[in-house]
Amino acid sequence: MQGPATSFTVAVSPACRSSREIVMATYAETSRLLLTPHRFIVIAGPGDITRESTDAIVNAANSSLMGGGGVDGAIHRAGGPAILQACEAIVARQGRLPAGKAVATTAGRLAAKYVIHTVGPIWSGGDSDEPATLASCHTESIRVADELLLHTIAFPAISTGVYGYPVKLAAEVAIAAAAEALALAATVREIKFVLFDSYTVRQFMQAAKSYADSKSLILDSYHAS
Ligand code: APR
């Protein structure tokens, strides 16, 4: 699978220059799904979520919370041992984390303040509540961010790597669940999907476009020059 590209400067049309946060973005592609002018979902990539400076980044963990490969391994490597220590304390206190639930820890050396760990469903054909569990990962992560009074949170494409969830289907669930939770959130105002490869970016862009069309919402799109 193709990894993230190096930084791009996003070129935007003059009509879009009022959106500072988009002008400053450094992804090949960025889209923004507006629920309101101050409450929106950003889809960005290819990119590495460990470099995000949102208030929290979400980790696609497993129930042991002891780390693993993929984005989980990248977050533990970049954030350092404080994250694992905090995970061990959580497991000692409350046991393994069930799929669809979320807990927060320090982000260690990362730019984000917190890592919110959630456990996605393992894809087994789609008839084992995978969509509901994946939606819950997003709803619960946003609920935890709200409890911490956070404003911005970044998600990877949960379950679409080792756990085998088809990216197109996961994107549809993730966008809808994030939008519904964002509409009800107390403090969270921006949800950012930071996607590792071009194929996943395209699938999330398409899911956002379909969601925007179905709800008559605005989707801004920007491309690197
Ligand atoms: N930034 C953003 N996305 C990333 C990064 C990164 N640094 N590294 C990997 N990804 C992407 C993958 O390309 C994939 O699209 O995250 C998505 C989720 O893939 P996985 O990390 O494999 O997560 P998941 O499918 O949920 O499987 C979870 O993997 O490593 C283990 O401990 C983890 O057992 C758990 C399982």
Image (cartoon, helix red, strand yellow):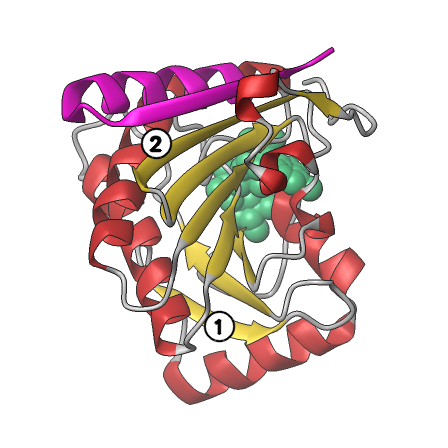
Q: Position of residue 89 (x, y in %)?
A: 55, 85
| Residue found 35% across the figure and 70% down from its top | 146
Q: Secondary structure at mark 2?
A: loop
Direction right: furthest residue:
6
Q: Position of residue 28 (x, y in %)?
A: 69, 20
Task: Name the residue type under label 2.
Answer: Trp
Would you identify the image quadrant in which residue 139 lies?
Answer: bottom left
Range shown magenta: 200-225
CA–CA distance in space, label 2 to label 1? 24 Å
Q: Is residue 189 left or right of residue 162?
A: left
| Residue found 71% across the figure and 18% down from its top | 2
Q: Main secondary structure of the magenta part?
A: helix
Would you identify the image quadrant in which residue 57 lies?
Answer: bottom right
Give the total of numbered labels: 2
Residue identified by numbered label 2:
123
Residue identified by numbered label 1:
104
Label located before the other in sequence (2 or 1): 1
Q: Position of residue 177 (x, y in %)?
A: 25, 42
Above or below, 33 against 80 in this view is: above
| Residue found 50% across the figure and 15% down from its top | 202
Task: Name the residue type under label 1.
Answer: Ala
Q: Is residue 55 left or right of residue 46?
A: left
- Front-most of residues 14 and 25: 14
Above or below, 98 against 203 in this view is: below
Above or below, 69 against 118 in this view is: above
- Front-most of residues 162 and 29: 29
Q: Position of residue 67 (x, y in %)?
A: 63, 59
Q: Is residue 213 magenta?
A: yes
Q: Is residue 72 left or right of residue 101?
A: right
- Front-most of residues 153 and 105: 153
| Residue found 49% across the figure and 55% down from its top | 153
